[in-house]
Image (cartoon, rainbow, N blue to C red):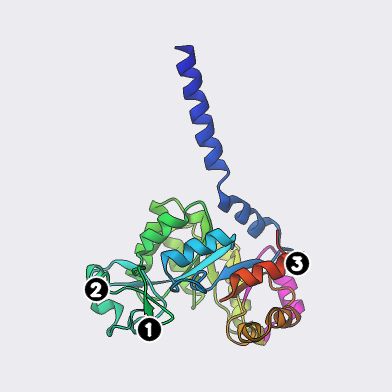
Amino acid sequence: MKYLLLLFVCSVSLQLYAQQTRPVDAILDEFYHHPEHVMVAAHRAAHTKHPENSLAAIREAIAQGIDIAEIDVHATKDKVLVIMHDDNITRATGKKGKIADYTYQELLQFPLLFNGQPTTEKIPTFEEVLQLTKGKIIVDIDFKEDSIEFAKQTIDMVAAHQMEDQVLFFIYEPPFATQLRSFNARLPIMPRAHNITEINDIERMSTQLGKFPVIHIDDSFYSDTLVQRITGNGTRIWINSLGKYDKMEGRQANSGFDQLRKDARFANVLQTDYPERLLAYLRQQGLHR
């Protein structure tokens, strides 16, 4: 009897230890407590080898040790939340029509393309993404629907999986944050600022809603003074390497990242289509754990 009791206690202890040492916990510790380190966000997940926004691309991001997987959320005709960047399925599947024109079961007919060729990957649901990423990686939810109903559905699903601590809910219009927080006060929100005026609005809003963990800005109005003020208060600054910098990087290794670091040296979350390269670059510079 004592032996069985000892086995039970050991089993419970191991389960508790496993729960307390999730891979995502090290990422979250860096995110919230080490602003001197730069976090890597994989745009549409790690899609250099797999279809963008696919479960395979997310698994790849996790395997590479990337900090954040960015995904895009839409809703189908039958109100299933699915992952795809565009509101139509043409680029991702080669088929015509909008996501909202199809039920989820109908969408399952269409394999995702990679380099123009069909793969075994299907359009994933948001719930499948949550199940895959729980405890492993931060998920940046780029919510594409102009619908409060679907926003609440998305937030409720995050809560049902007890994953509020490892998501960021990206919003394009900062005032939307008030309504989202009314749905779930624990939800980490990343507002988008298009200029300094919007930065000031977001900072004022934070006095009522609480500090935002990260603000997405553009390099066009970046300044060291502005960003140091924000990061000094414990909020991270997210800037995209997408476009100009990633194009440079595609032509010559490190050229785009070098230029981005010159243009926005105090930004401490960088989103790229080359997450594995960026991670290696930052580690070489001593800027990543």
Q: Is residue 29 left or right of residue 177?
A: right
Name the residue at 71% across, 68% down: 282
Residue 15 screen position, x and y as percent: 50, 35
Neighbourhood count class around disc 1 (C-alpha, 10 Å): few under 14, some 14–19, many 20 upward: few
Residue at image mark 3: 284
x then y, percent, for residue 185: 48, 57
Whether the magenta-drawn stretch holds residue 83 is answered as no
Q: Is residue 237 visible?
A: no
Q: Residue at x 34, y 79 (%)?
A: 93
Q: CA distance from mark 1 to mark 2?
A: 19 Å
Q: Between residues 203 and 112, which one lies in front from this camera angle?
A: 112
Identified by mark 1, the residue type is Arg
Where is 243 relative to 209, above or below? below
Residues shaded magenta: 221-239
Kind of residue at disc 3: Gln
| Label 1 sits on residue | 91
Q: Quadrant of residue 155?
A: bottom left
Check whether the beta carbons of the residues at disc 1 and disc 2 lie within 8 A of each other.
no
Could you tell me which secondary element the residue under label 2 belongs to?
A: loop
Along the horizontal axis of the image, is 44 left or right of 277?
A: left
Residue name at image x 49 percent, y 29 percent: 11
